[in-house]
Amino acid sequence: MSVPLLKIGVVLSTMAMITNWMSQTLPSLVGLNTTKLEAAPGGIPDRSTGVLPANPEESWQVYSSAQDSEGRCICTVVAPQQTMCSRDARTKQLRQLLEKVQNMTQSIQVLDQRTQRDLQYVVKMETQLRGLETKFRQVEENHKQNIAKQYKAIKGKMEELRPLIPVLEEYKADAKLVLQFKEEVQNLTSVLNELQEEIGAFDYEELQSRVSDLEERLRACMQKLACGKLTGISEPITIKTSGSRFGSWMTDPLAPEGDNRVWYMDGYHNNRFVREYRSMADFMTSDNFTSHRLPHPWSGTGQVVYNGSIYFNKFQSHIIIKFDFKTSSISKSRPLDYAGYNNMYHYAWGGHSDIDLMVDEGGLWAVYATNQNAGNIVISKLNPNTLQVIRSWTTNHPKRSAGEAFMICGTLYVTNGYSGGTKVYYAFHTNSSTYEYIDIPFQNRYSHISMLDYNPRDKALYAWNNGHQVLYNVTLFHVIRSDEV
């Protein structure tokens, strides 16, 4: 801001110097500073001594140091009457003075124009400098805020990664152990090759003992690999748009290699027809399917196909039915004791979703609620052949408040809703009988999820979202358990 002020000061100083010069110099131009002005007797001018006439009308005067309303210099000259002799020396000097004054007036006008132009430029520059200063201040503040946000984000990532340090150390140790196993296998292979060439050259019992010991060590190493923990869910992949607002679809996680059949069930009650598509490609591009008629209508959307059979909840009951597709008959049915049914303890979206059957890496599960647990979620591990409850876990999460739920590696994950903004926010770990609140974003593209199940073979979530069949890929973090755990 000092540059514009300096320019304004220079302009004002210049104008003051011009005013001072005119007040001091103009009299000298006509000899008034060295000539004693006296009035001659009778008012007759004495040209030899430079005496002015006593009559004011015959005299002349110069006025300076005057300014107009805009601060410009104004010089006023009162000339004698034209009756004076034009050949008078004073008249000649006055004419020269008038010419100089006119030239000075023109110069002052030019200077004033330049001054006004410079002043406008200074004002403009001042505005620009003020704006630039404001922008610099904003940039500086934004830079500080961005640095603070980046620092906070990095700190948060470091806090997340800190627990992984001991995990990585164990990975290193296990990697060394695998290398040792590899060397021992190579040694045993060499010994076996030699043994084939010369029977009896090596003690067979000792060789068998070494193989058994290696198998046990490998088994112990594999047991240290725990199931993955859910850390992320991808954006939805729309496979097909078909059916009503509610329904379920799935593939068999235990199907043999090459069996990619898709199973499709439209609606959540009063329906007993299951569609079978030969492959995912057929499901996506055609309506060629085989229809299977169940002996009873199903209830809800919690059906699951597992090892060639479909497991479903019989409509308006707490009975679980296992239906074999090969024989087209019921192979087993059993009531799920104390389980609520017929919209007693459904998911938040309703739809007779009281009993939800699901599978993961550990097998078959049932998720429901009971009066004994005050309507909160109960998790039961089922025997897939007998449908008997192997073990149950009670949670503190109300079944009616859950949007949907799915199992991954023995952990039940629950969403906070079924419409609009959705996320996975609750997890119950059956291996430790503990729970935690989490925050995993979950994109609900079509705003109404009525089915959400995990397929351990595909490592994907199957969803029915408002008449759209959708897939989500999941990210699992595999943790190595230490021997102390």
Image (cartoon, grey):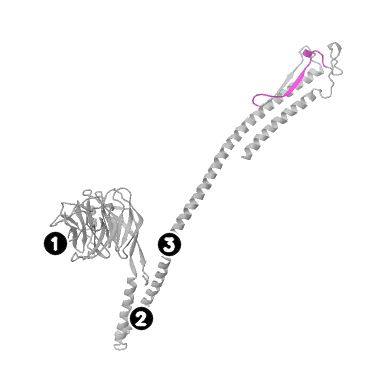
Residue at 54 percent of width and 42 percent of height: 134
Residue 161 image offset from top left, x and y in percent:
42, 62
Residue 384 image offset from top left, x and y in percent:
20, 65
| Kind of residue at disc 1 | Ile
Q: Secondary structure at mark 2?
A: helix
User: Mark 1 Cα within 10 Å, few/some/many (few <14, many 20+)?
Assistant: some
- Determine the image quadrant of residue 188: bottom left
Image quarter where the C terminus lies is: bottom left
According to the picture, the residue beneath numbered tag 3 turns out to be 161
User: Mark 2 Cα within 10 Å, few/some/many (few <14, many 20+)?
Assistant: few
Residue 108 higher or lower than 469, as above or below: above
Image quarter where the N terminus lies is: top right
Q: Earlier in the sequence, mark 3 or mark 2?
A: 3
Residue at 84 percent of width and 24 percent of height: 34
Please name which of the two marks, 3 or 2, marks the residue nearer to the observer: 3
- Determine the image quadrant of residue 109: top right
Judged from this view, the residue extending furthest toward the bottom is 200
Which residues, given as a range, are shown in magenta? 52-70
Residue at 64 percent of width and 37 percent of height: 5
Depth check, front residue: 70 or 194: 70
Numbered circles on residues, count? 3
Residue 387 image offset from top left, x and y in percent:
19, 64
In the picture, the disc for residue 330 is 1
Q: CA distance from mark 3 to mark 2?
A: 39 Å
Residue 425 horizontal side relative to residue 356, left or right: right
Q: CA distance from mark 3 to mark 1?
A: 50 Å
Please name which of the two marks, 2 or 1, marks the residue nearer to the observer: 1
According to the picture, the residue beneath numbered tag 2 turns out to be 187
